[in-house]
Amino acid sequence: MKGRRPRPLDDGDSGEVRVSGHLSWAKPMKNKRDFLLLQSATIASMSIILDCTATAIKDAADSLIKGDLVAFPTETVYGLGADATNKDAIARVYKVKGRPVGHPLIVHISSLTNLDKWAKDIPEYAVNLATAFWPGPMTLILPRTDLAKDFITGSQDNVGIRIPSHTVALALLKEFEDQGGLGVAAPSANRFGAVSPTTASDVEADLGDFLSMSDQILDGGSCVIGVESTIINCTLIQPSILRPGAITKDMIENTISASVSQRISNIESIKIKASGLLESHYAPNAKVFLTGSPTLGDGFIALDSFATPIGALRLASPKTNTEFAQILYKAFRQADIKGLSRIFVKPPTGGGIADAINDRLAKSATDK
Ligand code: TXA
Ligand code: MG
């Protein structure tokens, strides 16, 4: 447990700490952020790193190199990271997520320098997109090199690559590469089909029971974007958006001076598998309704300008669409914590990030 701190249940003053659901006792040291574990025999789960210092990042990168899993914050959602060249570590990612094997994973790298290691025959428009929006909330699907094995790509001839902008993510990737790593595969750190995590506590709640003692969760606060990256297929002459996100259709079209399609119905014809493109995904336990009115005890999510229908339980009142994206998954999680069976959502309008929100809403509202 050296260099790692368990996550306090409260502000630490009581001295009670919890490590992934197991109660244990610890005493705060002089520096309140340091805890001494007095009893660790019963602790069988991962560590949560509250303070992502340079030492903590080094330790986390070391864990990745050894084949352990490290969940880390990105600007979109938290990812469950593993060495993208380590078949066994990747097998654990699938197991921990409960994700069917064969769904491809996004490889995260720290800079454009490493792009050629994973992807080849990169079209000029993709270079333009990469230059404009990386580091940032965008994933490019590109023809793969031999480094991108079948266990990463779902046996497809392409690979998803992203350079995230969150400082903790970038620091981790850089350190991992300095230690000889080539890329970190990281799906969203939730169980398959469920809502992506936007805080370290969400990751703990979803995956705590499935992670091992040598795994870690880096706590980098709440994700500022709140919905997953824009995925762009760059394997054809023209790019197309497979999953809308914060890098919007307009932003992409302005960068490449051409129009792009945002339809995902051609997914079969281009033989690209993307689990986030399944009809039912990103779903809370509660049933999501995008039309109709809530009745007594139903959850309600809408922009601030909409009044709460009588009897409904307001879960969120974002002032802007950007804020809507930030809080959507949190509001879904709140509904599940409260045990609600129905959530009514007023979908935002106006394009841009609203496209991403509406895409996730449509998928969460599909019958499972
Ligand atoms: O914002 C994000 O993209 C987050 C953070 C952690 O980077 N990651 C994320 O990963 O959302 P995941 O695995 O939960 O969703 C990525 C989607 C999946 O639907 C996956 O199937 C698809 O991207 N994908 C990954 N590689 C692909 C590829 N080579 N071809 C087609 N789809 C791919
Ligand atoms: Mg996901």
Image: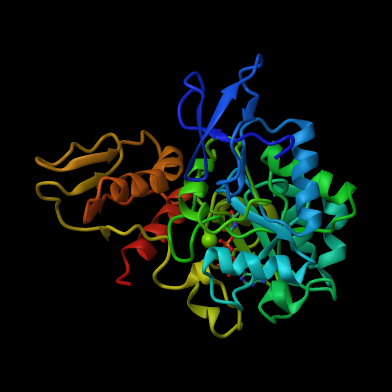
Q: Would residue 334 appear left or right of 39 to someone viewing this image? A: left
Q: Which quarter shows the N terminus?
A: top right
For the point 82% across and 49% down, which residue is it?
A: 176
In percent of width and height, residue 127 lies at 79, 58
Q: Toward the viewer: 317 or 27?
A: 27
Using the rendered view, name the quadrant where residue 292 is placed. Answer: bottom left
- Residue 261 in the image: above or below residue 130: below
Q: Would residue 316 appear left or right of 322 to someone viewing this image? A: left
Using the rendered view, name the quadrant where residue 104 is placed. Answer: bottom right
Q: Toward the viewer: 38 or 212?
A: 38
- The reply to whether residue 235 is in sight is no
- Residue 183 in the image: above or below residue 150: above
For the point 60% across and 69% down, which residue is it?
A: 94
Number of numbered callouts drawn: 0
Using the rendered view, name the quadrant where residue 52 is placed. Answer: top right
- Residue 7 in the image: above or below residue 345: above
In percent of width and height, residue 318 lies at 35, 36
Q: Would residue 29 appear left or right of 114 to someone viewing this image? A: left
Q: Which quarter shows the C terminus?
A: bottom left
- The reply to whether residue 316 is in sight is yes
For the point 39% across and 56% down, which residue is it?
A: 358
In percent of width and height, residue 174 lies at 82, 45
- Residue 332 in the image: above or below residue 160: above
